[in-house]
Image (cartoon, rainbow, N blue to C red):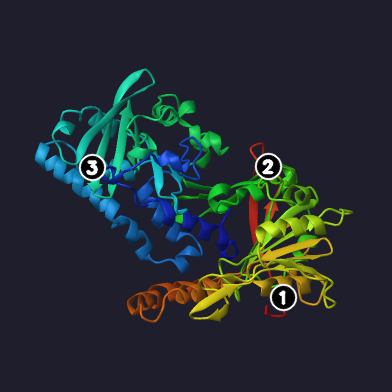
Amino acid sequence: MGLNRKQWAGIAVATVLVAGGIVAATIGWGRYGGSINALNVDLEHPQAYVSTPALSKLPRDLIKAPVLRDVLTEDFAFYYEEHESRLGLQGALKRIAFEHDTTLGDKLIALALDEPAEMAFWTDAKGAPRHWVIAMTRGVLARTLQGAAALATNDRQFSVIDQVRVNGDTLPVYALTLSSRRTLALVAQGNRVVVLSDPGLLFDAERKADAHSRDIVGALLSADAQAQAVYRRGFGLGDATASGNGHTLVADARLMSFGYQHFFPGLRALRFDIAPGGAVLSTKLRVDGLAALPAAPADRQLWSALPANPAACTLLPADWTRARAVSGAAGWPALADQLDGPAAICWYPRSQFHTPLVVAQLREGAADPSASLDALTGWLLPAKAAALTPAARTGAQRWQREVAAPWGPHGDAAATTYRPTLARQGRWLTFSPDEALVEQALDAQARRFPSVADSLPAGPATLAVVAPRQVAELARREAFEVLPPEQELFRRAAERQLVPRLDALGKLPTARAVAAGKPDAEGWVALDWQPFPLAAAKAR
């Protein structure tokens, strides 16, 4: 279906996938000190996935898409074309071609980047998707690699790491060192080629092939299309023809949840399908069955507990029977048994990125959870945390602690603090590191302040709300908050490059995401982005 400006949110998230992955930095073999799989990189289950007719065309197609063409500039595409990883690869191949009189050269760059490929990503210890694997069918490139053993015996950048036994053949694994910080691993079989961002994705600290990783590489190299589709099968995408000639980008819930996916296991992935030229986009959500999606009008009850005018707000499908195993903290299993329905998480323009508001609901007729909350907060908010007596103004219970940390809203430049607060009011449980958001949520729950539900139109259940103007306001303030005046060059660069893009983002309309139909057999349900009016009152 054709896009309009109301559907900006899905495309914006797609940009994050590209910016975080296509040319992410890798760790050079020369400095490599241990198995990347020690960080739980499982080559069978990536955290993000891209299927594209040409990796080199993806950034340019994104900036042609509606909305992104207003927010991004040509610099976005130029960045990837001129990135040091691509330039380093191009320079290395040119040098090898010149010194060894081979056919390696610019043609191989085109073969790698200008034809169909699959790319899978995993995050590093800092949460950035810097580890990746590219799988592609390239007969010329595969034959070149298969005949490169002699070249690799005396080249300073191109060498054989080891041999691996896959699909009945013993194959050499080549290391192509781009710099002291970047080394790629390449292996080919038949007309298939696999490129790994780091040898450590395939080898352990002793440079022995990891058995599971070797099996996945073998499947990607297989001549059998069903065996090759290990990533598409894992994400429930069907065969490659399902994407047509367009780009498919998938973000797994593990990537989106920043390590907290156990708290909402009903959400599995988010997907974007982009046509060549950026003309068409569909956004889809993958969930664990119908129970993971709230039905209208039941969703309004949760939205009524959230203060109006968030920058971004989303429901979190939650299976509380599974979530009870997340923590062994005293009080949590008993409390999880009393929770019901999805939770919600929101960011507000007057707060901070790292201080969202989280709201959950107790089951109808649930027993008094005070004992469980006392035990839980003793672990969550130790030391000075204490249950406060119900306040006469709100009738709410609160648990709170003062925590010293950088960038806090309290204190002075020498020492700032946060006041993480947990509150219970009726069936609602509310938490945030920003106590002001908790108080505002309590007011919304008591109908003393507008809620998100006050602006919801009739129709399908609302799964998310995004307000570009508030997002831009929050991003602008946070960016300059961490750039002190003495970092003048960085501040000037932010003012010149970031501020105009945020200004463009802030002009886009507020939208809500609703489910367009029911999930298919693999759990994928299409999302429709609709206009969403802001409440008349401004958030405090």
Q: Give the residue number, with chain letter if any, for mark 1.
A: 535
Residue nearest the observer in this picture, 267 or 181: 181
Residue at horizontal 60%, vertical 73%? Answer: 351
State which tag comes first along the sequence, 2 or 1.
2
Name the spot of residue 69 as percent of width and height, x first: 45, 65
Q: Residue at x 49, y 81 (%)?
A: 413
Q: Is residue 339 above or below residue 197?
A: below
Quick check: 490 left or right of 64? left
Residue 341 sits above or below residue 140 on the image: below
Q: Nearer the viewer, mark 1 or mark 3?
A: 1
Q: Nearer the viewer, residue 182 or 279?
A: 182
The Cα atoms of the two marked residues, 1 and 3, are separated by 56 Å
Say what amino acid the circle numbered 3 marks: Lys
Q: Earlier in the sequence, mark 1 or mark 3?
A: 3
Of pointers 3 and 2, the one earlier in the residue sequence: 3
Looking at the picture, tell me which residue is in the foreground, 125 or 266. Answer: 125
User: Helix, strand or loop at disc 2?
Assistant: loop
- Res 459 seen here: no
Q: Is residue 85 above or below residue 511?
A: above
Mark 2 vs mark 1: give the one in front: 2
Q: Residues within 10 Å of mark 2 (few under 14, many from 20)?
A: some
Q: Closer to the camera: disc 3 or disc 2?
A: 2
Q: Quadrant of residue 220?
A: top left
- Give the spatial CA distance, label 2 vs label 1: 32 Å
Q: Give the SS element for disc 3.
A: helix
Residue located beneath label 2 in the image: 288
* Amino acid carrying mark 1 in the image: Ala
Q: Residue furthest top?
A: 168
Furthest residue in direction front, as rendered: 383
Give the CA distance from mark 3 to mark 2.
44 Å
Q: Amino acid at mark 2?
A: Asp
What residue did someone put label 3 on?
A: 107
